[in-house]
Image (tube, rainbow, N blue to C red):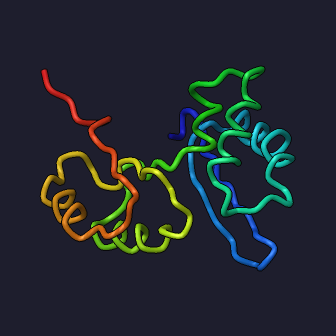
Amino acid sequence: IDVIGSVIVEIELTNGINGVGISIGGEPACYIIEHHFSRFLKGEDQHNIEYLWDLMWCSLINYGRKGLTIQAISADCYMSLTVGYTLKLLELIKPYNIKWLEEPLPPDQYNGYAQIKKENHSTCLLTCGEHEYTR
């Protein structure tokens, strides 16, 4: 991540709740988030996730709709969570109808993914396998 540069985004809701997201993209991503995306998010209902995602996605046409620009609106855990933390997170994000959570565990933690699948009572899907390789 140090080669590309990290991005940490904090969003504060009008009720004082803060959310934090971490991705890659360095200064270019910071610029897009602060000077482009922010104008679409201010004052909007945070529960209208699909609308906000579509709004940001469509606004990227001039910048490109892949790579750096899409990373700013993804929910990729980048193999950094534990089973317990993932289950708690899935419970906490239930009200926001998030479609999927990407790679919460390292790819070879098959038992962990099985446990999450068994104990997950939300409609949020898990995606994984991006970092699993064979010959």
Position of residue 103 measured from the top left corner of the image (x, y, whole percent): 35, 48
* Camera-nearest residue between 85 and 101: 101
Q: Quadrant of the C terminus?
A: top left
Residue depicted at x 68% and y 55%: 9
* Camera-nearest residue between 7 and 83: 83
In the image, residue 12 above or below residue 98: below
Q: Does 66 sit left or right of 121 as displayed?
A: right
Position of residue 37 measured from the top left corner of the image (x, y, whole percent): 78, 43
* Camera-nearest residue between 135 and 120: 120
Count of numbered labels shown in the rendering: 0
Hey, which residue is sitting farthest bottom in the picture?
A: 15
Residue depicted at x 23% and y 35%: 132
Q: Does 74 sit left or right of 81 as displayed?
A: right
Residue depicted at x 43% and y 50%: 100
In the image, residue 70 above or below residue 101: above
Position of residue 125 measured from the top left corner of the image (x, y, whole percent): 36, 53
Position of residue 6 measured from the top left corner of the image (x, y, whole percent): 60, 45
Residue depicted at x 63% and y 42%: 72
In the image, residue 18 above or below residue 29: below
